[in-house]
Amino acid sequence: MGGLRQRADYLTVNEIAELLRLNPQTIRNTIDCGELPAVRFGPRRVRVKQSDLDAFIAASTAAKQATKVEQYRVALSDRDAVAAPASSDPTPEVWVYEVEASSPDQAVARAIRQWHSEVDNDVTAHTITVSLVER
């Protein structure tokens, strides 16, 4: 049994959480959904092999690197500017943003954040129209 004291082949949930700087419940959830293999010793004692943790981290890193990032063009128009009675020009103002994202939803969210930081400095509500233009 001296080998177990020299090398920690099995880690506790708390050790993994501390190592990865995560909440222990996050580790438990990852184990419960089957993403991280674990050995159970009764209802409350759970251990993870160091090699399984290493494989899980490597797979997570590879998946993150494999996420394809694409260039999107997102057009935003302020419909409230058209509805404003003082507006002499009925054409809405349009802003076009080139953003990198891994999905169209993420591209739209990034464009809206960029628009909000550049154009909409007050807290009034706006109704905007979003168009995802060809990539």
Image (cartoon, helix red, strand yellow):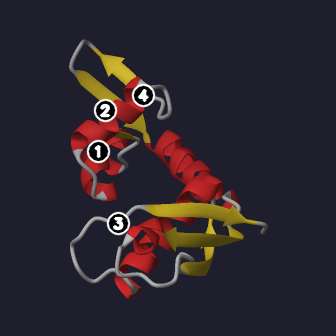
Q: Residue at x 66, y 58 (%)?
A: 67
Along the line of sight, which residue is nearer the eye, 98 or 59?
Answer: 98
The location of residue 73, given as percent across then percent down, is: 68, 73
Task: Compute the Cα span from label 4 to label 1.
Answer: 20 Å
Is 90 situated above or below 104? below
Quarter of the picture holding the C terminus: bottom right
> Which residue appears farthest toward the right when viewing the image?
134
Q: Which mark is residue 5?
A: 1
Left or right of 50, for residue 130: right
The location of residue 8, given as percent across then percent down, is: 35, 46
Q: Residue at x 45, y 79 (%)?
A: 114
List the residue tagged with mark 4. 38
Left or right of 133, for residue 88: left
Is 41 situated above or below 18? above
Mark 3 Cα-neighbour bin, 10 Å: few <14, some 14–19, many ≥20: few
The location of residue 27, given as percent across then percent down, is: 33, 39
**Closer mark to the observer between disc 2 and disc 4:** 2
Ranked by sequence position, the earlier of labels 2 and 3 is 2
Along the line of sight, which residue is nearer the eye, 9 or 25?
Answer: 25
| Amino acid at pointer 4 | Ala
Ranked by sequence position, the earlier of labels 2 and 4 is 2
Mark 4 Cα-neighbour bin, 10 Å: few <14, some 14–19, many ≥20: many
List the residue tagged with mark 2. 28
Left or right of 52, for residue 39: left
Ranked by sequence position, the earlier of labels 4 and 3 is 4
Q: Secondary structure at mark 2?
A: helix
Ranked by sequence position, the earlier of labels 1 and 3 is 1
Task: Compute the Cα span from label 1 to label 3.
Answer: 63 Å
